[in-house]
């Protein structure tokens, strides 16, 4: 594949998007459309939209351009689908969606379109957040944490909550203080566990609360170190998958299944996996 940027004529772009839009209109036609597509609503489609976004992320992680293209197409379909549903209720259509984001991008890039001064990534990021803050205020979202979706994955939501609070100074000055807090939360978790050491049933609600505190501080630690906690955990997940698959492969070569093996055997091959590139 050529490394040169792909150049498209306006008519070609418009035709491709119009074709997709017309396909969705056909699928939603009350008389001749697809029965499944016809019964969908904003609410029923939303989980598929989230799923497709994750599949885009997976394709990007794998690095295959063809897969990225295909998954982006699936995600684009979700946008067209939601827009078609909205247009049937006279709320908005795909043109309104495109115009809305175009206007937003122009407003959020005054250093490009209005020649404001923002000559480095940090300045651009600060300017972006200031503009978004004004946009939230115009919507009546006046609290510092307003506008952070509660439906976001918990890790991403925690990062956004912490970052927003940090913008007004509610933040630990250095990493060591975050580590101290992590040790404190870990001790509280251990103390809660010890209350059930005599055989009493564990208080799952209390344990969940303490464990949530630990996870929140770990995410804060990642943020302070400029590490994306979602990416860090995803990397560890991939590492675990690779090493566990190695255990299974080695056990399989002995004509045994994992359930036939002791923990010591599996630990042996786990340590072996750690020596592999």
Image: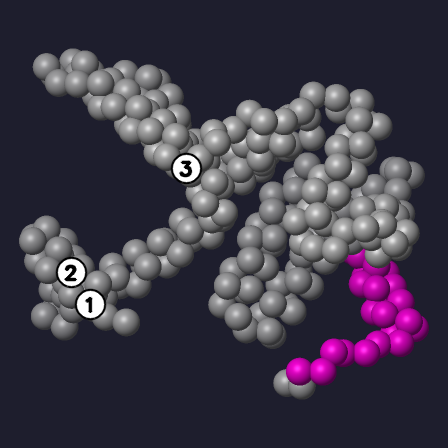
Residue 194, given in percent of the width and then of the height, sits at 17, 18
Q: Is 7 drawn above or below residue 15 in the view shown?
A: below
Q: Identify the residue at horizontal 50%, vertical 47% (top origin).
A: 226
Q: Nearer the viewer, mark 1 or mark 3?
A: 3
Query: Is residue 39 in sight in this rendering?
Result: no
Residue 138 falls left or right of residue 155? right
Q: Is 195 drawn above or below residue 85 in the view shown?
A: above
For label 1, the residue is 275
Quick one: 203 or 174, which is closer to the camera? 174
Quick one: 176 or 2, which is closer to the camera? 176
Residue 105 falls left or right of residue 214? right
Q: Which residues are magenta?
A: 3-29
For label 2, the residue is 271
For label 3, the residue is 175
Q: Main secondary structure of the magenta part?
A: helix
Residue 105 falls left or right of residue 202? right
Quick one: 210 or 175, which is closer to the camera? 175
Query: Are the residues flagged by discs 2 and 1 in contact, CB closer than 8 Å?
Result: yes
Q: Quadrant of residue 257?
A: bottom left
How far is mark 3 from mark 2, CA to CA?
A: 31 Å
Residue 78, given in percent of the width and then of the height, sits at 71, 52
Q: Nearer the viewer, mark 3 or mark 2?
A: 3
How far is mark 2 from mark 1, CA to CA?
A: 7 Å
Classify mark 2: helix, strand or loop. helix
How far is mark 1 from mark 3, CA to CA?
A: 31 Å
Earlier in the chain: of badge 3 and badge 2, it is 3
């Amino acid at each position: 594949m050529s490394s040169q940027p792909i150049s498209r004529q306006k008519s070609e772009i418009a035709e491709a998007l119009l074709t997709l839009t017309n396909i969705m209109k056909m699928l939603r036609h009350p008389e001749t459309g697809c029965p499944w597509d016809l019964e969908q609503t904003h609410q029923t489609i939303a989980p598929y939209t989230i799923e497709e976004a994750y599949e885009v992320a997976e394709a990007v992680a794998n690095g295959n351009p063809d897969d990225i293209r295909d998954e982006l197409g699936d995600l684009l379909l979700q946008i067209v689908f939601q827009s078609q549903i909205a247009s049937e209720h006279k709320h908005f259509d795909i043109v309104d969606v495109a115009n809305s984001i175009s206007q937003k991008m122009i407003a959020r890039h005054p250093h490009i379109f209005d020649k404001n001064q923002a000559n480095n990534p940090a300045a651009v990021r600060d300017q972006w957040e200031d503009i978004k803050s004004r946009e939230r205020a115009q919507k009546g979202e006046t609290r510092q944490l307003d506008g952070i979706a509660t439906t976001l994955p918990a890790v991403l939501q925690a990062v956004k909550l912490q970052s927003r609070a940090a913008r007004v100074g509610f933040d630990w000055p250095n990493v060591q203080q975050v580590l101290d807090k992590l040790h404190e939360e870990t001790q509280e978790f251990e103390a809660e566990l010890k209350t059930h050491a005599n055989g009493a049933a564990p208080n799952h609600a209390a344990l969940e609360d303490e464990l949530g505190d630990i996870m929140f501080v770990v995410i804060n630690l990642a943020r302070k170190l400029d590490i994306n906690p979602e990416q860090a955990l995803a990397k560890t997940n991939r590492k675990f998958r690779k090493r566990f698959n190695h255990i299974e492969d080695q056990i399989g070569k002995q004509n045994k299944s994992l359930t036939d093996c002791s923990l010591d055997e599996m630990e042996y091959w786990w340590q072996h996996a750690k020596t592999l590139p």
